[in-house]
Amino acid sequence: MAEKSPAADVEAGLLAHLNSTGEVPDSRAFASSLGVSHLELEGVIKSLSAFRIVDSTDIIKETWVLTDEAKGYAARGSPEAQLVAAIPPEGASKDALKAKLGDAFDVGMKAAARNKWIGFEKGNKDLVLRKVENVEDELQEQLKRLENGEVVPDKVIDDLKRRKLITKEKSIWYSLKKGPEFVVKRKTLATDVTTEHLRSGDWKDLEFKDYNYGAQGQPIAKGYVQPLMEVREAIENIFIMMGFTEMPTNNFVESSFWNFDALFQPQQHPARDSHDTFFLKAPAATSQLPEDYLEKVKQVHQSGGYGSKGYGYDWKRDEAEKNLLRTHTTAVSTRILYKLAQEKPFAPKRYYSIDRVFRNEAVDRTHLAEFHQIEGLICDYGLTLGDLIGVLEDFFSSLGMSKLRFKPAYNPYTEPSMEIFSYHDGLKKWVEVGNSGMFRPEMLLPMGLPEGVNVIAWGLSLERPTMILYGIDNIRDLFGPKVDFNLIKSNPLCRLGL
Ligand code: PHE
């Protein structure tokens, strides 16, 4: 048997009353006759109404309730009465009274003066004298009456309103009658057959509660996928559908050679400054660079070749050997293109990568010092800018961005270069979504790729589309130590516009 709860007592009391008198005209009065709060009775009424055991009608009334300040006065007396009570026969200094009354001092002084309960000695405004023996604390009386739900005159209400001691509140209570399913005692339905029931045989007489087939099960505890990883996988699937193979991105540490020099990025380029790039202290330099190729890279920077004039500066090996945290995944693309160039005969390829890159940036709502780059490239004979535009349109429309625009741009390693913009329906504007171009001959020919082979390539961040897709406007809510686990737990499946 379930233990008898206070709610069960309230229910029994209510049903017994309805059984004998047929109605409860005012649930609030009834609650106080039972000695329980109206809230408690309300719970019982709701449950009984749901089973149509009682019929309830709402009674909505606006009542005056005491503010916290007024509740204090109802308990301890009005400030003016407290003030008078605090004055000894010989009088008291204002400071002493202030210390005793605290917040109530100012109001108490004013009201007590108005009532002529206090006065001052001639020439001494600091000594407060008491002018009456006993005061009748009418304010406290009225507040107590209001608190007990008793009626007070309108004039008093106006006065309390003016002093901001009461506020209007809507309250709801009920009048009750027997419902169509009225019973004096609710049958408790069994939910389980226990060994006890089987032993005693009383299961034969039990009434069982219906199964609720609509009830939801407990959520299953399982792992959750971070939104970035969700979008990463979706993008990976697009690349794979388009026939791309993944490049190995497993080295965050890269040499300046592969990150910059091999990309025909001059050694005095501002991106190679420590304000933009994280250089390693230990090991500060790499000792392994392909010598033949390095020599060709040096030549093309210094004096050109392959139809180029080069940059005409004194190329330094030290600079190329400096280790850094890769600033773009184009370093990975460069390595793989060099490897591809060594394989004879040449075979066309499509490659992609998605991994982390690092930049010495000031962190703000849209920038972190580390983020993920997505990069794709196609290497084949006779590719044109038209091919690049076509591939970008295929790729981005798979991501749900079908309105694209291109803007001429500059990268040391591509010519021509284009920034990619997509029209964002939600933001109602064109947003930059990536960068692209055709790798320069000064980059490809020293690697040993055959004449006539072009590489079209593009890169974008993973964070940007993820933020747009998930409506996140601060990158720190998506990545890093401030990510809220609930964001990950409630992360919906990511379906791109495939
Ligand atoms: N590396 C470029 C960046 O970091 C992206 C890019 C990749 C541009 C390939 C052109 C070609 O923004």
Image: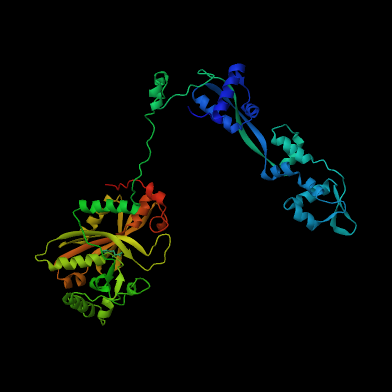
Farthest residue toward the bottom? 314
Above/below status of 312 relative to 101 = below
Res 452 → quadrant: bottom left
Residue 158, how many percent across, how many down? 74, 39
- Where does the image place residue 191, in percent across and percent down from the top left? 41, 27
Can residue 425 be seen here?
no
Q: How is the image coloured?
A: rainbow
Image-quarter location of ligand 1: bottom left
Is residue 287 left or right of 121 when viewed as pictured?
Answer: left
On the image, which quarter does residue 269 sit in?
A: bottom left
417 or 286, which is in the foreground? 286
Residue 95 appears in the picture as rendered? yes
Farthest front residue in view:
199
Look at 30% across and 60% down and name the residue there.
373
Q: Position of residue 246 (x, y in %)?
A: 21, 58
> In the picture provided, is 298 more to the left or to the right than 465?
left
Question: Who's the residue at 50% across and 22% down the image?
Answer: 186
